Amino acid sequence: MNTMLFSRWLPAIEKTSIVRKGALGVAGLAFVGGAVAGPAVAAQAAPEHVGSPVSQSVLADKDHKNDKDHKGDKGKKDREPSRDRLVPRGVQGEQSRIDLSAEQAANVRAIVKATKKAGMDERAAVIAVGTSLQESKLENLGHLGDRNDHDSQGLFQQRPSSGWGSVEQITDPEYATTAFLKGLKQVDGWRDLPLTVAAQKVQVSAFPQAYAQWEDQAADLVAEAWNNS
């Protein structure tokens, strides 16, 4: 009778031994992995998960959910900004549009990148790009001699004599954009203003309505560049 019981228990004992050996092996790997790769890797390799179908099922479901969440976040990240965020009040008046060279397109990305670095949103980028479209057609202009408007230079035609910075500074796209945005931040309710009004309060142009014509193209350019800058 004892021999028969032992024979019945033997497979279970052998199975338990194999599980323990497997657990010990993974535990050893977890220790080595934890020393090199940190606690997160060690936790994933913890022996309590070995030989436990319920735990493995829970972990698999969790990993599947994390993968779905990650893909969802990536989809949101890659999505273009909504038109409502880019142009909350709609465009004002007739719109103009120009074809961009590679240099002009690079300057759009530089403006967008500087806007994001400054912690400002898509609307700020639209106002900045629209302003540059009017001031320089998105070209980083140096001094134009007789054709120059006083000492205005760069993407935003900022003037050293008016305190915008040195020539070297205002012809640097990141510096020029950041300087413009600092001025924009001082405008009350700038997000809800028409582009031409917000831009004029910073630029103080002799042609205050001229910025309005570029709002549609500025919005399109920012939408395209926002997730690629």
Image: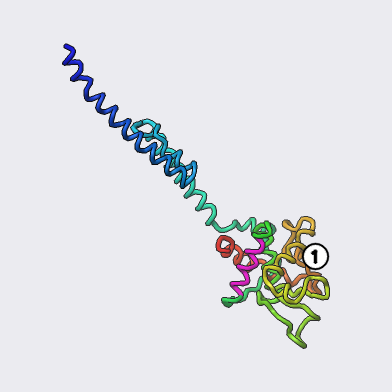
Q: Residues within 10 Å of mark 1 (few under 14, many from 20)?
A: some
- Measuring from the top left, give residue 128's x and y in whole percent: 69, 66
Tell whether position 106 is magenta: yes
Relative image position of residue 145 (x, y in whole percent): 76, 87
The quadrant of the image that shows the N terminus is top left
Residue 69 in the image: state x and y as whole percent.
Answer: 49, 45
Q: Residue placed at 49% from the left, 41% from the top?
A: 39
- Give the left or right position of residue 148, taking residue 79 as reference: right
Task: Place residue 143 in its image quadrant.
Answer: bottom right
The magenta-colored residue range is 104-115
Q: Residue at x 35, y 31 (%)?
A: 52
Pick whichever, 118 or 27, lies toward us.
27
Name the residue beneath numbered marker 1.
201
In the rendered image, residue 191 lying in the magenta stretch gets the answer no
61 in relation to 175, above or below: above
- The amino acid marked with disc number 1 is Lys
Q: Could you say whether the residue bearing mark 1 is in a helix, strand or loop?
A: helix
Q: Is residue 147 left or right of residue 31?
A: right
Furthest-right residue in this view: 162
